[in-house]
Amino acid sequence: MNKTNILDIIKNMTIEEKAGQLTQLPSMYFDIDSSMLTGTACNFDIEKKWLVGSILGKLDAKSMRAIQTKAIEKSRFNIPIMFMTDIIHGYKTIYPVPLALSCSFDKELINKCARLSAIEGSAAGYQVTFSPMVDLVRDARWGRVMESFGEDKRLQSDFGSEMVKGYMGDGLDKPDSLAACVKHFAGYGAACGGRDYNTADISEYSLQNDYFPSFKACVDAGAKFVMAAFESLNGTPATANKWLLDDILRKQMNFDGVVISDWGAVNELICHGVAQNELEAGKKALESGIQIEMSTTSILQNATLFIEQNNELEKLLDSAVEKILLLKLELGLFDDPYRNISEKREKECLYTQEMKEFARKSACDSAVLLENNGVLPLKPNSNITLAGPYAKSCNLLGPWSIDGEIENVISVYEGLEKSELNINNVYQTDFEKITDSEIDNILESARKSEFTVLVLGERESWSGEAGSRSDISLPKAQIKLLKTLKNHDIKIIVVLFNGRPLDLRKVKKHADAILEMWFSGTQTGNAVADLLTGKANPSGKLTMSFPYNVGQIPVYYNCLSTGRPSELLTNEPRYKSHYLDIPNEPLYYFGYGLSYTSFDTNVKEFNISEDITITVDVKNTGEFDGAHVIQIYSKKSVSCVSRPKKELASYEKVFLKSGETKTVKLTVKNDIAKIWTQNDGFMFDSGEYELFLDDKKYKIFIDNQGKFKE
Ligand code: GLC
């Protein structure tokens, strides 16, 4: 089979057969039960189901082989089906949620997470994953911040493209690869009020400079799909937004893959008020650039009709079918529709020792130490009381871990029990109801222990899709437990499990240490034990600011200055950009994270050529081995437009044994000067820039060709 054959097939397909290729149905319609519905089910003529070009959701090797066999039999041209699902942070073996992974500041780690996920997912029969999600996020009320890589476009771009490459491995023709679908295009994370699916109003200045770059990076890295977002962007739903899906994605970003709608989003054009009925919805989506309709059948059921009304639409249909069939060709599905899957391979590839070890390492490397007055790390044989809603719970996989297996999860109790710590007592509590007698029992045990470890946080369901919250603080019962213990001078280590930045003012006030674990996956308990005992040294740095409180949202580090910056107008009591009741600064800022050790950085060389290369000697000056993230920020104080107060320009992570020194090279590229403006489009913003590395500052000059000058 080759491209010529594909074009011949298309010439001989009926409109309905073509429309079938543009249709994706959940696996639940194909004799597979328990497919997770992430939207409403659709009603359609069930007999047409074998026309579909792809299936999403629950699957295994046996069921994929059965469905594929039947689908090919039913197809006049023996066209195989593509199988897709949400492998977001692991498949069976679950790694930390993407927001946690991003705090590792480790591109290789994130690439490996995708690679291992692809080995598992492809063995179960999938060829495509709806990942990476690279929505820029600045609003912790939104439940899906856990699925993103935070508030910085460089990290979103770097980590998103590493995932695309990790999924692809040695190429899509290899049976252990997955094609990546980057999502949600675009601006979904800016939902008004942090309420999921809500409208987003974003200037083109911000779209082009903040929200689009990560999608361009993933397209350049080889993403084969782009998923259109649910929301209405600047008044037009992304699913029917030709400017977005054609002018920007196709023409500006040179994307030549397949654009897929989100679940039910084509039919949702009716609720958005831009389509009268399903026929109009299907037609409008196709005209705007949608090429696969997920989980509804407006195109399938109406294509013949709307092409009769306007035969120009058949060209769009043909172009979509060509892209879809050529992708199936690239995936090797015409040669081997089963891509070498078998129950034997599936059994061998799931939850291997390498995956378990990586799950433990990635959970350690994604954790962020927010506070530590010296209580951590705990010495061997320390005796502790363990209490809280996550003491024995195994609900630690986090949202979007559909195929994760809770029976494989290591709870905190299990992990600590195997460690060198002595657990005097363990108390599994509720999230929101902790009775006074429970608190009394915990206090009684705490008084007989050296330390108390409180494992607190959010329920898994309080973040993820449709998991928006107006209050981002911990439940009152958890704070009451913490305060009661503190009032009795108990030494308290708080370990947090949550899917978003929280309002931690009260935790900061009463805890001796705070370890942010996020939702850290299958090996959580072992990772917590490694981190609390110092076997692993926390090295994570926040990639999303923790607001002082929910009223401060949106708060993010790379914001523009204002005409009345409060940090400069210190003598002005009122007329400046500030709050009357809280500070402007977040409680914990982007790039922040503590360690058990300390580091010294000494710049050896500052070299200007095509790029800027900064050579740094980093020394571990403390008693614990550990990893350090060197961060370089850039700033342009005067420009033709307002520029961010600072932007991450480069970063490197280096592991050092206690007392060890290593030389690290960091590169600053001219992308720090590449901006988009309303008047000039994309340009190099020439002029003087400052670079900051810890307390050191350097001035550099970039010309309008993007060349660095002395
Ligand atoms: C969901 C999500 C999307 C996911 C898709 C398939 O509604 O918005 O991210 O990939 O449906 O599950």
Image: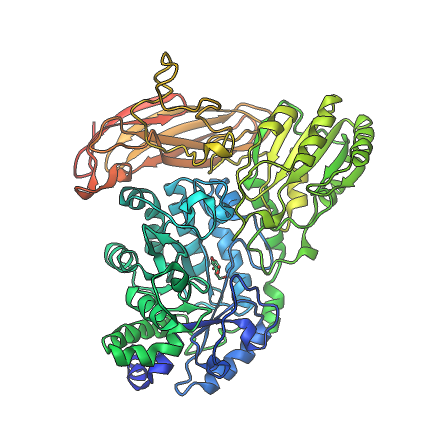
Quick check: 303 left or right of 356?
left
- The residue closer to the viewer here, 504 or 284, is 284
Residue 13 % position (x, y): 33, 84
Q: Please identify the quarter of the rendering in which residue 269 is found.
A: bottom left
Marks counted in the figure total 0
Q: Please identify the quarter of the rendering in which residue 3 is found.
A: bottom left
Indicate whether 254 appears above or below 97: below
Residue 490 % position (x, y): 74, 24
Residue 502 % position (x, y): 55, 36
- The residue closer to the viewer here, 405 or 331, is 405
| Residue found at x 63% / y 28% | 513
Q: How is the image coloured?
A: rainbow
Quick check: 488 left or right of 520?
right
Asked if residue 41 can be seen in this view, the reply is: yes
Point out the residue furthest to the top here: 571
Quick check: 381 left or right of 37?
right
Asked if residue 535 can be seen in this view, the reply is: no
Specify the quadrant that holds the C terminus.
Answer: top left
Quick check: 114 left or right of 529?
left
Residue 57 % position (x, y): 53, 67
| Residue found at x 59% / y 74% | 32
Specify the quadrant that holds the N terminus.
Answer: bottom left
